[in-house]
Amino acid sequence: MTTKKRVFISFDIDHDDGVKIMLAGQAKLLDSPFDFKDNSVKDHLTGDWKEKVRHRMDNVDVIIVLCGTMTHIASGVAAELLIAKEKNKPYFLLAAYSDKNCTKPTSATASDKIYNWTWSNLKTLIGGGR
């Protein structure tokens, strides 16, 4: 049995909480390649919340940036992606919706592609295929 990847899900809590719950739920599937470990927080943690996010990211293998329709204005998602980059954590952008225009966080680069959220894509992306 292969070891499951531990993931941190970065997402716009104000607009995409429902899809984050669905994504985290996929970790429970028998053939899931990942375990849901941690995610963005709505209420900023006391003290330096960015430092606490850094510590949370120490315990994960990959960051999934869930991109919804308002991600381009979600400052917390942009900050979390910057932290992931600082820590050299592998990450990928995942479209939260197949029928809406999903946007990137401001800290994403032009070369960061938003991938379609399908089960086969998710397995490939978590396995490092991008």
Image (tube, rainbow, N blue to C red):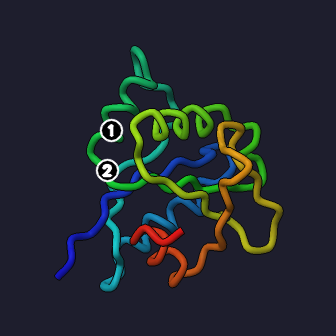
Residue found farthest to the left: 1
- Crowding at dot 1, Cα within 10 Å, few <14 / some 14-19 / many 20+, comes out as some
Question: Toward which corner of the image does residue 127 lie, by quadrant?
Answer: bottom left
Judged left or right of residue 52, residue 9 is: right
Q: Which residue is drawn at 59% across and 60% down?
A: 18
The percent position of residue 123, horizontal first and vertical second, equals 44, 77
Residue matched to label 2: 60
Q: Nearer the viewer, residue 55 or 91?
A: 91
Q: Which of 117 and 24 is in front in this view?
A: 117
Q: Are marks 2 and 1 in contact (CB under 8 Å)?
A: yes
Q: Which residue is drawn at 40% across and 18% down?
A: 46
Q: Quadrant of the N terminus?
A: bottom left
- Crowding at dot 2, Cα within 10 Å, few <14 / some 14-19 / many 20+, comes out as some
Q: In which quarter of the image is the C terminus?
A: bottom right
Label 2: state its secondary structure: loop
Q: Nearer the viewer, residue 41 or 6?
A: 6
The percent position of residue 21, horizontal first and vertical second, equals 50, 62
Residue matched to label 1: 56
Question: Toward which corner of the image does residue 14 lie, by quadrant?
Answer: top right
Judged left or right of residue 91, residue 2 is: left
